[in-house]
Amino acid sequence: MYKHIVVAVDLSHGEAGKALLAKAIQLLDEGGVIRLLHVLEDVPSYIAAELPRDLNDRRQAEAKVELGLIAADAGVTVESEIRTGAAASQILQCAEDCGADLIMIASHRPGLSDYFIGSTAARVVRHAQCSVLISR
């Protein structure tokens, strides 16, 4: 069905990432590629000044290990990527950069304005140039 799938993973909800990857594997064409993406939110500068200088490097290294654990034993080509910035915009940019034909994202903890899907998922749906699958 799909040749290039971006699976956006929030590592603070580990099991949701594994479930999304399992669904992506079912939807992937033979020879297709899954890109497992985690976005690290920027730390505001007034907070960053009080944190250790290597904190961002440590966050990246930890995220890389966790993505590797999720992708282990997938049985298909899974590329992992970590980006920094606003989650929705980085997910959309990643999809554009790799020519994705599907973005998969989990929705959780909706606020009042985005009751049915979470705010990041809502932004991705509104602005994506490809299909988007939201998992609950």
Image (spheres, rainbow, N blue to C red):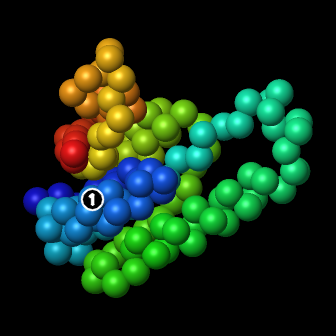
Q: Quarter holding the N terminus?
A: bottom left
Report if residue 9 is visible in the image.
yes
Q: Which residue occupies 51% across, 59% down? A: 81
Q: Is residue 85 left or right of residue 87?
A: right
Q: Is residue 60 above or below residue 108?
A: below
In depth, the one of 42 and 3 nearer the eye is 42
Q: Which residue is mark 1?
A: 20
Q: What number of labels is visible?
A: 1
* 116 or 99: nearer the viewer: 116
* Residue at (31, 46) in percent of width and height: 105
Q: Residue at x 26, y 23 (%)?
A: 115
| Residue 68, image x, y percentages | 49, 74
Q: Is residue 70 above or below residue 54?
A: below
Q: Position of residue 23 (x, y in %)?
A: 19, 62
Rendered view: 14 above or below 89: below
Please identify the quarter of the rendering in which residue 78 is found. bottom left
Q: Nearer the viewer, residue 135 or 31?
A: 135
Does residue 126 appear in the picture of this structure?
Answer: no
Q: Nearer the viewer, residue 105 or 29?
A: 105
Circle 1: element type? helix
> Which image quadrant for residue 134?
top left
Rendering coords of residue 88 (x, y %):
44, 34
Q: Would residue 87 appear left or right of 56 to someone viewing this image?
A: left
Percent x, y for residue 42?
66, 37
Question: Residue at the location (48% across, 56% down)?
Answer: 11
- Residue type (three-letter) at the residue carrying disc 1: Leu
